Amino acid sequence: MKALRKKRALAAGFLAGGFALGCSAPEPEPSEPLPPNVVLVVLDTTRADILSAYGYPMPTSPALETLAGEGMLFRQAMSTDFWTLPAHASLFTGLYPSSHQATSETNRLATRAKTLAEYLRSAGYRTRAYVSNAWIGAERGFAQGFESYIETWKTNSGAVNDYGFDRAGVAGAGEWIGERTRRGEPFFLFLNLNSAHMPYSPDTMALVDVAPGPRPIDRTRALRKVKGMWHYLGGKYTLDEKDFEILQALYAAEVAMVDALLGELMASLEESGALDNTLVIVTADHGENLGEHGMIDHLLSMYDTTIRIPLVMRHPPTIPAGSVSEELVSLVDIVPTVLDISGLGERYPEIVSRSLLRDDRPAREFVIAENERPLNGIDLMARNYPDFDLARIDRRMKMLRTPHHKLIRYEDGGTEVYDLLRDPGELEDLSETQPELRDQLLGQLEAWMAAQGNNAAPEPLEISDPETREQLRSLGYIE
């Protein structure tokens, strides 16, 4: 893309000209190009196929549709894990979980990992984050590189739920964007919006607008039972097809509410005058099960319901409006792409070579997702359900996904194989009927694993902060 190469050169020239962190920068001349701002938004727990931007029949994401119409929508974007902490670590570092080691066995991102915020701050960007999910709190190492890291569940005592925390974050972000723009300071803003996470409690109007099927929705029927995936596995409650329909309606309404907040954020960017010099990236950390494979929530699932995520990018100087990519992409591609558009290619050529917008980037053969032993869940199940067979969950998992097929490999040797073109719902396991295909995919996975080397994990981090523990308890992760 010629426009992309031109923008890289302008941004690189500005950064080389001495805009360094901690130094007072001269007021830019009117003709002096500013490097692009970067706004990265995670719609926590948002699966792609519940978004109208990805074909859902109800209007769950008009703001995201508008953004996609002004930029690029990636149809085949995948997470690196099915839950918050490792997926965000991949988003921040450009590494898979086996490399960054921020997993369910450590509960934190090690300081040795270099994050996108650190890259951009060292290049002179002002950096701020608003996060609404305690799994990516500062205590767990995710504040690396941010001048201010605002944990909205701690700083907004008047808010009573994730939506209230998210609203506060978007409002604060709008004010900060305006201030940075007035001062002519390039900025990196990260927002985690957690409203779509269980428990689902959408506003009535949002539910009326997007719920399919008959109305009114009996919102208490399913929710009065649901206490998260672990208790569901333990048999504390059962759910039938009607319950799953209700959960989907409630979830879709919460997705629509988060999309409205995204619209407010985009309005703040436009009102500040910063929008067209801002790279906006909207994605998710993982999706959600709504009864598929007999599962709810998002834990323990490597199916596309939890791994396939939205990804939309907008930056008019480099990304053609209304473009669509069918390429298989991953959260690990975000860091290289941001550094590329920000003009930092000369500093980090090996990283930037993996940018999604590089003309010479080879098509990806596969993407990977990984999960370690779910220690928090193992502990919860052992204490509450002593007869539960822990071997069902006490195992590591890896997934290899090509454009055509998926392999799920369990630590105990079990495998699942799916033909995603013929069987997009992943209902027919081909492991036994097509052993040649299984072995081919296993060979690809084992070769990839061998190339990763042995990365030592940091010591596990205890969850000690009372406010953090309460928020994680409300989300169903711990007791």
Image (cartoon, rainbow, N blue to C red):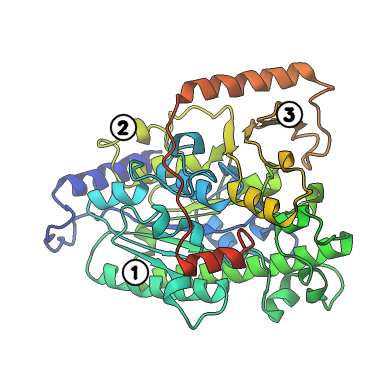
Q: Earlier in the sequence, mark 2 or mark 1?
A: 1
At label 1, which amino acid type do we have? Ile
Label at residue 415: 3
- Judge the density around disc 3: few (<14), some (14-19), many (≥20) Cα neighbours within 10 Å: some
Q: Position of residue 204 (x, y in %)?
A: 71, 80
- Circles 3 and 1: CB distance less than 8 Å? no
Q: Earlier in the sequence, mark 3 or mark 2?
A: 2
Q: Where does label 1 land, which residue?
A: 177
Q: Position of residue 409 (x, y in %)?
A: 68, 30
Please give left or right for residue 366 compared with residue 460 in the image: right
Seen as rendered, the residue at the extreme bottom is 158
252 versus 220 height, above or below: above
Q: Position of residue 126 (x, y in %)?
A: 27, 60
Question: Which secondary structure lies at badge 3?
Answer: strand
Q: Where does label 2 land, which residue?
A: 349
Label at residue 68: none
Please give left or right for residue 364 compared with residue 109 in the image: right
Distance of mark 3 from mark 1, alpha carbons? Answer: 48 Å
